[in-house]
């Protein structure tokens, strides 16, 4: 009593996460649940699941899901959890907006909703902002740089705790091979500039 609901791939389309939905019973309300099949194994039942990320090797899967402890009486409490390899890694949180996974799957970063204003790395708060729009790990995955929205509709980069000036727009982040700086293209005063931000 199940049917195929959706699927998600990694970048090279080598690995697959299938989202299945349990049967709905018209005799009882709120009976449908989703579960994810990854590498031939079914993971837990949730009311909903989204934002699936697969590491480069296809061994690890992370996603956002509803808190499995939710009941009809407390549907607005403990709403979202981070699931990593089939187990709840963190949460429950009021809401999670975006998530990133390191290439090897060793780390997961995610932002809480705007009211909570937190950016987490694994289970620890990395920064007091929820306006993160992109993130990139150093080659050894020991450091994380990210782009966040700042004041006046502009953006900034944080790398190893150091914050850049504000820019009108910022392109993708790139790390040096030795992990000593990040580099990106940005727009400042309507001009395109290349920024090399040392750590």
Image (spheres, helix red, strand yellow):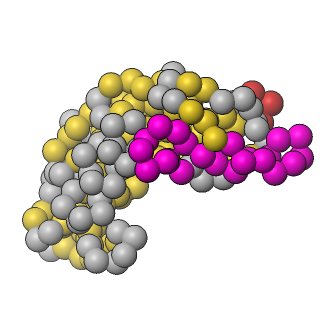
Q: Is 76 situated above or below 174? A: above
- Most common secondary structure along the magenta stretch: strand
As for residue 144 lying within the magenta part, the answer is no
Identify the residue shown where x is 24% and y is 65%: 57
User: 126 left or right of 124?
Assistant: right
Q: Is residue 135 left or right of residue 192?
A: left
On whether residue 185 falls in the magenta region, the answer is yes
Residue 61: quarter of image: bottom left
Residue 174 at x, y = what percent?
A: 54, 51
Q: What residue is drawn where x is 50% and y is 24%?
A: 161
Count of residue discs: 0
Q: Is residue 127 above or below residue 196?
A: above
23 and 50: which one is in front? 50
Bounds of the magenta span?
A: 174-195
84 relative to 143 in the view: left or right:
left
Q: Judge whether residue 10 can be spotted in this image.
A: yes
Residue at point 18% right, 67% down?
Answer: 37
């Amino acid at each position: 009593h199940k049917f195929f609901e959706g699927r998600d791939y990694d970048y090279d389309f080598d690995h697959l996460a299938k989202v299945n939905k349990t049967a709905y019973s018209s005799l009882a309300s709120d009976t449908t649940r989703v579960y994810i099949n990854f590498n031939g194994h079914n993971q837990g039942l949730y009311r909903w699941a989204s934002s699936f990320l697969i590491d480069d090797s296809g061994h690890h899967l992370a996603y956002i899901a509803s808190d499995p402890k939710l009941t009809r009486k407390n549907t607005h409490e403990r709403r979202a959890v981070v699931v990593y390899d089939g187990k709840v890694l963190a949460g429950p949180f009021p809401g999670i907006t975006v998530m990133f996974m390191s290439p090897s799957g060793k780390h997961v970063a995610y932002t809480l909703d705007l009211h909570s204003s937190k950016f987490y790395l694994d289970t620890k708060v990395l920064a007091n902002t929820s306006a993160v729009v992109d993130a990139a790990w150093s080659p050894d995955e020991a450091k994380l740089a990210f782009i966040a929205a700042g004041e006046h509709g502009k953006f900034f980069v944080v790398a190893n705790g150091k914050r850049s000036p504000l820019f009108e727009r910022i392109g993708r982040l790139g790390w040096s091979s030795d992990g000593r700086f990040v580099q990106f293209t940005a727009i400042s005063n309507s001009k395109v500039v290349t920024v090399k931000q040392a750590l």
